[in-house]
Amino acid sequence: MKAQIWSTDFIASVIVFFLIFTTLMISWNYLNQKNAERMTMEEMETAALLVSDTLLRIPGFPENWNESTVQSLGLAMKENVLNESKVKMFFSLDYEKIKELLGLKESEFYLKITELNGSIIMLNGTYLEKGVYPENKSIIVPVERYVLLNSTIAKFSLVLYR
């Protein structure tokens, strides 16, 4: 009789132990996943701000770059004032080359320059839009800034995603 009670107590305690252990493991994995997502989001936010700052604040390198000589992208004549010829060259560059020059290894991007009413600006027959807008992506980081293009206020919209 005592052995049966002991084995029942033992089995009950093992079941309770495994329930608690399983709950702790599931919680631990959930917290680790959320922490990794938060860190990825912070990295992408930093990258999005760096990319937009780079494009909108500096002229690039060399200062008078073109499609074949560009080493570092920049669209600005001065801060938030865009150089029309550099904007045209930028939007004519290959998507993968732009990603490489901007240092976007793991992220994809979508960039457009629009009028204040939201319509995409066309410059010499080219719409100022590059990339594919993200649909159903887990991490999306948008950045919007106002710039001057041809003495007109425009909206610069960049979206990084994974």
Image (cartoon, rainbow, N blue to C red):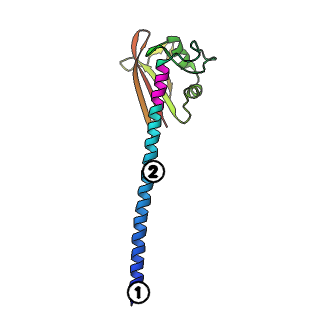
Q: Which of 5 and 98 is in front in this view?
A: 5
Q: Is mark 1 on a helix, strand or loop?
A: helix
Q: In this view, does 161 lie to the left or right of 70?
A: left
- Badge 2: residue crowd in 10 Å (few <14, some 14–19, many ≥20): few
Relative image position of residue 23 (x, y in whole percent): 40, 61
45 vs 70: above or below: below
Q: How many circles with numbers are drawn on the protein?
A: 2
Find residue 148 and report its image quarter: top left
Q: Which residue is drawn at 46% across and 32% down?
A: 46
Q: Residue at x 42, y 47 (%)?
A: 34
- Bounds of the magenta span? 47-56
Q: What element carries label 2?
A: helix
Report how far apart the C-alphas of labels 2 and 1 lie in the structure: 42 Å
Q: Is residue 39 above or below residue 100?
A: below
Q: Badge 2 is on which residue?
A: 32
First in sequence, mark 2 or 1: give its number.
Answer: 1
Q: Residue 4 carries which label?
A: 1
